[in-house]
Amino acid sequence: MNDLQQQVQQAIDGLVESGAERGLQVAVYWRGDLVVDTVAGVADPATVRLVTPDTPFYAYSVGKGATATVAHVLVERGEFDYDTRIVELWPEFGAHGKEKATIRHALTHTVGVPGIPADTTPEDLCDWDKMCAVIADAEPWWEPGTKTAYHAYPFGYIIGEIVRRATGKPISQVLREDVAGPLSIADELFFGVPEPELGRLARLEDAEGSAEFLASMPDDSPFFELGPRAVTPTAEFGNRPDILMADIPAGGKMTARAVAHMYAALVGEVNGVRLVSAERLREVSAVAFSGVDQIMEFPSTWALGYSVGRIGTEAKETPTVFGYGGVGGSYAYADTATGIAFALTKNRLTPDFSAAEQVAGIVTNAVADG
């Protein structure tokens, strides 16, 4: 493990030098210790501002891992249970036959309301009450708990409103007070970024050809059922100040070392802090639902709020891995078998996770070799 930092540094330097990536961060915790904290490249091509370890990246759905973690911390505290019906906290959610939907269903993307209206705008996404009202009134696509489809945007609002109804606080505040604060990462892990902090963020850019590819996709493509074209996660969308400052807990803004720290504190103790008990971790990380995604038509395996399996592998090959990838190729996970917590954040939005697969492979091999 001694030369792992150097191996990872060489890998990400190579990705930048080859032109495949613009700026990256990689952080790895192993058994509670930070063993890799590396950066490479440029955070803002316009100013040639370099990536530093405390540069936050909008890592899109990697933030869902933080959303789920907030829920688990509150379950641990007794605010609600996984089988609590959502209507017990949020009565309006029961419209159109969703009254039996539970928090477990929300965490496993089986609650049945994966889409948002086709006329949703970026401004709508920034309006918490409007989005929650729309989702609460949505007709379910199936009986909650029976099928799955990735709830790209609704996941964040549903869990976030459950948190708000239970605590009286917005989920961003609960994240800061009960997750990021105790871990001393409150200035590196956000849903909505405070306006004075916007200048720290990396600027996103689309990989060559990706904007043209999106433009060529028909409006009735299944991809746009996850979120209409106006709110598709492109660089232009993700660089908007209103989007960056808004509580949209379907995504998050973070440094790699912050989100790796969070995952490390789920699987064990870090600097005297553990987010959930060992018993809770076993429940949180176990397979909770498997099925074919009703929109994208690929097999999906969910733990309670996290995807199961390491990027580039099938869930059954790496069943002890839980985490989230984000549009553009950022990725973070923990492995209960090895004690690894890994995060890679980057600002060039690529259509695949090749960078994360390459670097995660280096880390896995280093741990296997001792």
Image (tube, rainbow, N blue to C red):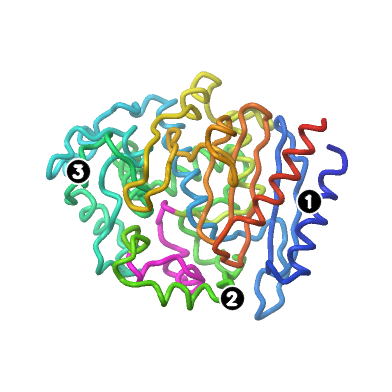
3D distance between C-alphas at marks 3 and 1: 46 Å
Q: What residue type is labelled 1?
A: Val
Select label 2 or label 1 by which is in front. Answer: 2
Q: Which of the marked residues, 2 or 1, is nearer the chain's N terminus?
A: 1
Q: Mark 2 points at which residue?
A: 208
Quadrant location of the C terminus in the rendered image:
top right
In the image, residue 218 lies at what x, y percent? 34, 72
Asked whether 165 falls inside the magenta stretch, the response is no
Q: What range is drawn magenta here?
A: 228-250
Q: Say which quarter of the image contains residue 49.
A: bottom right
Residue 317 drawn at (x, y percent): 58, 33
Disc 2 marks a residue whose amino acid type is: Glu
Q: Residue extending furthest right?
A: 3
In what element is the residue under mark 2? loop
Which residue is outermost to the bottom?
A: 46
Residue at left 59%, top 65%? 201
Please give the residue where the numbered disc 3 appears in the rendered image: 93
Q: The residue tagged with tag 1: helix, strand or loop? A: helix
In the rendered image, is residue 255 in sight?
yes
Sequence-wise first label, 2 or 3: 3
- Residue 289 placement, left or right of 31: left
Q: Which of marks 3 and 1 is in front?
A: 1
| 125, above or below 279, in the image | below
Three-letter code, disc 3: Phe
Determine the CA span between mark 2 and mark 3: 41 Å
Q: Around disc 1, counting alpha carbons within 10 Å, would you say few (fewer than 14), some (14 to 19), or many (20 or more)?
A: many
Q: Cα distance, mark 2 to mark 1?
A: 25 Å
Q: Is residue 305 above or below residue 284?
A: below
From the viewer's perspective, tell me whether residue 144 is left or right of residue 303.
left
Q: Mark 1 points at which residue?
A: 8
* Helix, strand or loop for disc 3: helix
